[in-house]
Image (cartoon, rainbow, N blue to C red):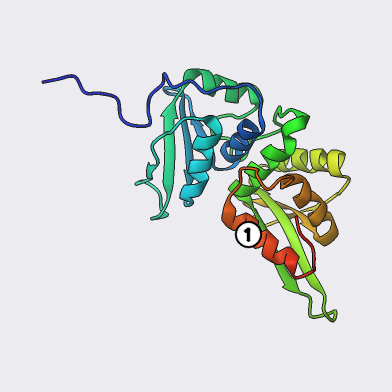
């Protein structure tokens, strides 16, 4: 019986360039939210219901990893990129990512030049925008930008770094089940932050989220 070859997407010899760039910072933002590190075999996993999200990750790390269904997920449409890479795994640890990070993630070592690329990746992973007309005020359209995390330490770090760079405070709320917290920015502060995150038409991003933002801002005559 012939020797079986490696499974697609598990090639440990694929080299990922760890020189800092906007694309690498964005990819780390995705891993910090939707990714998972597993010590046995230096396994790296990124799961999403958006195929575009995983294609963006592949584009940013410049490796065409297999995108496959995640059969063990409770979400039928969940997809994953999964691979083993010792050097990249060790690099992620040096940045501050850890196995079982959901509730323990803290500050990350992201160069200031690429912080907003990282933040955009984090937003595409676990962030959202929402808007509504406030019935208390005539023609009052409110909108928010929000980042979610189960780790208070990580969310506190994000808030401090955003304030240091944009000068907007934001506020942190806790969901009803006290599982995750949300860092939220309203209207004027939200607009300042979004323009930093989407500083160019060419940045890598999840297109459906950007389109939603553009439609939201158009209501108040603003644009990115």
Extreme-left residue of the structure: 1
User: In the image, 69: left or right of 63?
Assistant: left
Residue 132 in the image, given as x and y percentages of width and height: 72, 72
Residue drawn 65% across the image and 27% down it:
96
Residue drawn 48% across the image and 20% down it:
15
Extreme-right residue of the structure: 167
Neighbourhood count class around disc 1 (C-alpha, 10 Å): few under 14, some 14–19, many 20 upward? few
Q: Which image quadrant: the C terminus?
A: bottom right
For label 1, the SS is helix
Q: Which image quadrant: the N terminus?
A: top left
Nearer-the-camera pick, 17 or 186: 17
Mark 1, residue position:
211
Nearer-the-camera pick, 155 or 117: 117
Q: Is residue 138 visible?
A: yes
Q: Quadrant of residue 91?
A: top right
User: In the image, 61: left or right of 165?
Assistant: left
Residue drawn 38% across the image and 24% down it:
11
Q: Is residue 176 visible?
A: no
Vertical placement of residue 36 versus 71, above or below: above
């Amino acid at each position: 019986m012939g020797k079986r070859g490696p499974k697609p997407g598990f090639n440990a010899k694929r080299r990922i360039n760890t020189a800092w760039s906007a694309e690498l910072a964005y990819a780390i933002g995705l891993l910090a939210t939707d990714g998972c590190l597993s010590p046995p075999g230096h396994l790296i996993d990124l799961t999403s219901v958006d195929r575009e999200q995983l294609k963006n990750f592949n584009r940013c790390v410049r490796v065409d990893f297999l995108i496959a269904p995640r059969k063990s997920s409770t979400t039928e449409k969940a997809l994953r990129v999964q691979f083993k890479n010792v050097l990249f795994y060790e690099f992620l640890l040096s940045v501050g990512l850890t196995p079982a990070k959901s509730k323990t993630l803290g500050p990350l070592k992201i160069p200031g030049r690429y912080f907003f690329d990282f933040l955009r990746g984090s937003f595409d992973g676990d962030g959202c925008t929402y808007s509504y007309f406030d019935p208390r005020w005539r023609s009052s359209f409110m909108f928010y930008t929000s980042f979610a995390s189960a780790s208070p330490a990580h969310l506190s770090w994000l808030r401090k770094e955003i304030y240091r760079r944009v000068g907007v405070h934001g506020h942190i709320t806790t969901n009803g089940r006290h599982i995750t917290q949300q860092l939220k920015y309203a209207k004027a502060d939200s607009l300042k932050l979004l323009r930093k995150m989407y500083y160019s038409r060419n940045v890598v991003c999840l297109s459906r989220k950007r389109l939603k933002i553009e439609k939201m801002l158009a209501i108040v005559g603003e644009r990115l």
